Image: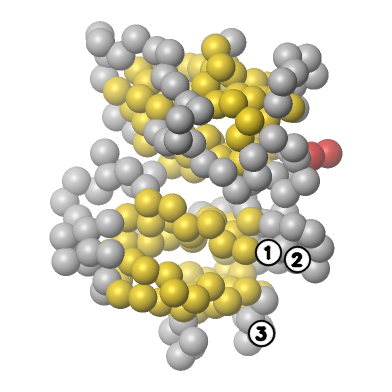
Amino acid sequence: MNNNRCPYDTQMQPNSYVRLFHASPDAPGVDVYVNNRLSARNLVYKQMTDYLTVPTGTYNVKVYPTGQRINAVINTDLLVPPNSALTVAATGKLSEITPMVIEEEYMPQINGNKAYVRFVHLSPNAPAVDITLPDGTMLFENVSYGDYTDYLEVAPGTYTLQVKPAGVDQVVLSVPNVQLSAGTVYSVYAVGLVGDEPPLEAVIVVDSMY
């Protein structure tokens, strides 16, 4: 993405990696300022930035409707640990918008013949859910809003993922043609609203293996 830049000096400290994700279903496009410097312009719902390379430390993050610099909808301090990779998501509906930090597991010795996938529940009005395959194989069980799972090692291939209310054999979202490649790490984000607009859907991204 061309609308992102990293304004930090990374020469003297260990680097970490941070990206930003707009997952608030009814929030407008936003500008994100880190330590009062613009880091993402007009980030819209379901959009995720590239990773920003930053030194370890604490950063102030402010989120404004695009083009504004008053009445931040999020104003928070973010601690970036050494040698870490984080996704910072704007979650919940606009009236209750909240930042959520999603950490990525350090995986220096992954099996290059396998794929890795996890699930992140960011649909604010959805119940706890199970993630299964069409044959009933349980991948992730009873994941509540705001929670995320560990990575699961799977055979590379093309999958259909089914999202069901926890303990109920009823598919509320089917995600077909999910291609998981060998040696790659993925997160599947559930975003949107159940029975409302924008609808419940999945955003699938490749994670850093820093």
How far apart marks 1 and 2 lie (CA) works out to 5 Å
> Relative to 45, does residue 179 appear above or below in the rendering?
below
Most extreme residue toward the bottom is 135
Report the disc number at residue 163. none
Q: Which one is in front, 164 or 9? A: 9
Q: Is residue 187 left or right of residue 94?
A: left
Q: Which corner quadrant holds the N terminus?
A: top left
Q: Residues within 10 Å of mark 2 (few under 14, many from 20)?
A: some
- Amino acid carrying label 3: it is Gln
How far apart marks 3 and 2 lie (CA) works out to 13 Å
Report whether residue 150 is seen.
no
Instruction: Tell me the quarter of the picture where residue 125 sits.
Output: bottom right
Report the disc number at residue 200. 1
Secondary element at image label 1: loop
- Amino acid carrying label 2: it is Val
Label 3 sits on residue:
170
Q: Is residue 58 left or right of residue 106?
A: right
Q: Residues within 10 Å of mark 3 (few under 14, many from 20)?
A: few
Report the disc number at residue 194. 2
Q: Residues within 10 Å of mark 1 (few under 14, many from 20)?
A: many
